[in-house]
Image (spheres, helix red, strand yellow):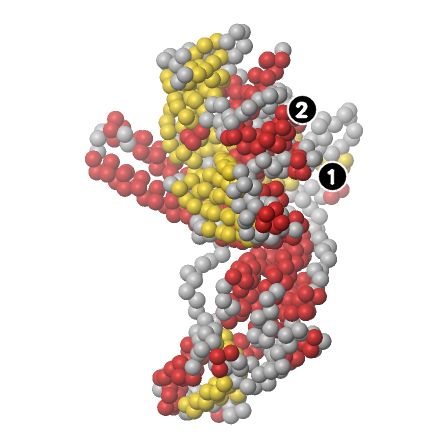
Amino acid sequence: MTAEEHEWNAAPPGDATPPSGPARTELLTFRCGGQCYALDIASVREIRGWSRPTPLPHTPKFMLGMVNLRGTVLPVTDLALRLGHPAMPDDARNVIIVVQQARRLHGLLVEAVTDIVRPAPDQLQDMPQVGAARDGVAPDRMFLSETGILQILALERVLPALHAPDAEAIP
Amino acid sequence: MADPMDAIRATFFEECAELLESLETGLLALQTGPRTAETIDAVFRSVHSIKGGAAAFAFSDLAAFAHEFETALDAYRIGQRGDLPHGVPILLRACDGLRDLVAASQTGAKATAPDPTGLRALCGSNEVVPTDPRGDPDPLPSVPNGFPKVWTISFEPRPELLSSGNEPSFLFRSLAILGRIEVRADAANLPPLENVDPTLAYLRWTLRLWPSAPDLTETEIEAAFEFVHDLCDLRIAPGTEALAPGRASQIPDMGPRNAVPDIPSLVPTTIRVDLARVDRLVDLVGELVIAQSMLAQDMTPGGSGGNPTGTDRMNDLQQLTRDLQESVMAIRAQPVRSLFQRMERIVRETAAQTGKTVRLVTEGVATEIDKTVIERLADPLTHMIRNAIDHGLEDPQRRTAAGKDPTGTVTLRALQRSDRILIEVSDDGAGLDRPRICDRAIARGLLPPGAAPDPAEIDQLIFSPGFSTASGVSAVSGRGVGMDVVNRAIRDLSGSIAIESAEGAGCRITTSLPLTLAILDGMVVRSGRERMVLPLSTILEAQTADLAAIERLGTGGWAVRLHDRYVPLLDLGRSMGFAVPHERWEAGEDSAVLFIRVEGGDPFALRVDAIEAQRQVVVKGLDDNLGRVPCVSAATILGDGQIALIVDTPAIAAAAGLDLQLAGAA
């Protein structure tokens, strides 16, 4: 366990803002490819330090490979590459966000986790149309904070397609 | 938020699956064996439980049909028309219908309720009774051999019965061993609660006993009351109580039945555990094995300075972890019984579709295999059995003409042979029609014209993909629909298929499977930076690269000599899609050549940079998190915690075959 591994599922103790209204989502924010992104915290299982993935052949370039998550084989995606940024530089300070969708576990390699935010519904807005979306993985909603724009990722579109690796394979 | 009802509903469907299974088991037992009261009761209980659950969850179609079913069974249970020869097949079909309705309720699909006419004809409704051709004029349940079919026992304890430490329900339980019983308590003498003296017996009972052995005598019944003989008034008489057929099905079954606790069975106690928990346990034990082997590596003589006690303890630990691993794997093992039973239905349906009469014989139903393997065997087995009936068995006329029993036999057999499980599907049909298969293969370009392959090669042709996709094949060829699908499914289970056929005498397909998918005997090899695991079962032989006779053929491929022939040589890293420099066949003094067996084809060879170890590895499936990856069958975690790919050697061969063809064409 490194210092970067926290339990993110529980709300931090002493949090001043009580949950007001049912519609408030909690978002985990992080840096990736020089920009700020956010993910629904309900889909985040844990944050892990970096370890070298075992490469997987015949998969898209953004698939870094697999790491050992306490006995489970965890596929890891270079999220920057997946979102159209340059590949993540090898850096031991990068972290892997372990996300879960239904029964599926997946790791997303990002630069650093930054915060947990609870935006009010009116703070969320649609992304302005700036050029063609890439593979349909681009975020479609965003959130304005004091620090700038946070792009909210739709997990089901970020995760590589299951059972159809051929379609995305790079020869 | 998940609906809490969903979880309860899921439990109901889980139970349904078990109940349906025991229902089918019971009905099949009724079909082949003697009609015992316990079996009928078990069958009845299954349907009744499904009905109850269905009603509670408002699955009205299911509840309604289960009710019809129950009514029919009740008639059966009372023994009133249990000797109807066609009864059991109707009940079996109703069981199939019930299964469909359960599935439909589960998925929310709309299903048409099965036609209950057959069931209604079975139960003793008044319209049917008089038209019964063999209409038994005597409604009294006494008959053959002069022994009564029902006994009525009146049991009135004297006050001392309880105070002397006797318990009526134990007596009833021992009575229940003799057959099915119905117990009615007469509470007329029961005083108001505040006046009850707990040491006194106030209740009287009337019991009816349907003996499982028809020749049960009064003395035998009396023996059950041996210990309380002087403590009660007992009257035993052949039962003649109102059992008129028209009323039979209205006898309430819940109240009296509850008076007696279930007879303790001899079946071992089991608990139901979510498979995910077992999987977690398997994972943890796998981790433990890895940690243990890392520790063992650290304690090699060089490391521990030759500490003999430590080494001994280490060996003990190793033994324990191995035992633990085996025990955990055994939790996942299940007998193939349920799988084989499911095939009964396939046989019934296919027989009905093809108009053939078929008997299914099952052997080795107690053989245990890993649960995941069992689940994934259902489809391939279904294919094979359908094929055996549809294409293997001749129709009754042809069979009679050939001097065979007009009823065809399909045999399903499971047996364990060392660390493999063999599943055989055999039929006593006509065998494969080899000339037709040959013609077909030549027409499809699978064989060169005029080829004369030997019988074994011809039999292998039915596994060719081309054979199953063509529409007219099932009508033309002897067999072959879907066999390539079967082959692939079995290969995905790390299994292999062998086929034997004798003209006019039948065909047998033997599937060989590993005991578990969770552990694999593997060879850990290195290619470039990557370590990979090759399943040991696919390796024929290994040679060091500098001694192997490697030849370059033309400008393209490489070949290496295996005994008296040359086989294609590939580089493992390149075949797997890793970037590896091409021209380095001899590089590295550890590099080796592994000869790989290909099911139904010629072997080929793989070059690796080093062979590191040979060991059992814990297989981690990738499907859930990743989907399928070409040339990779799974992954494992090595002693140092790193993940290694488990190589799908048949896929490499297939990919290489493609490459070779392309190279030849260019």
- Indicate whether B339 appears above or below B582: below
Please tell me if label 1 and label 2 are on a single chain: yes
Residue at the image point whose x is 60% and y is 53% from the top: B357
**Residue on which disc 2 sits:** A84
Residue at the image point whose x is 47% and y is 73% from the top: B212
Instruction: Residue A34: give x, y in percent of width and height.
Output: 64, 25
**In contact (CB < 8 Å): disc 1 and disc 2:** no
B24 or B33, which lies in front?
A: B33
Furthest residue to the right? A129
| Structural crowding at the residue carrying mark 2, measured as other residues with C-alpha within 10 Å and reported as few (<14), some (14–19) or many (≥20) | some
Tell me, for residue B301, which label it has, or none: none
| Structural crowding at the residue carrying mark 1, measured as other residues with C-alpha within 10 Å and reported as few (<14), some (14–19) or many (≥20) | some
Instruction: Residue B565: give x, y in percent of width and height.
Output: 44, 16
B333 or B451, which lies in front?
A: B451
Instruction: Residue B479: give x, y in percent of width and height.
Output: 60, 38
Quarter of the figure with the C terminus of chain B:
top right
Residue at the image point whose x is 62% and y is 49% from the top: B397
In the rendered structure, which disc, 1 or 2, sits on the residue that comes first in sequence? 2
Q: CA distance from mark 1 to mark 2?
A: 23 Å
Tell me, for residue A124, which label it has, or none: 1
- Indicate whether B386 appears above or below B220: above
Find residue B446 and report its image quarter.
Answer: top right
B609 with respect to B318 (left or right): right
A19 with respect to B577 (left or right): right
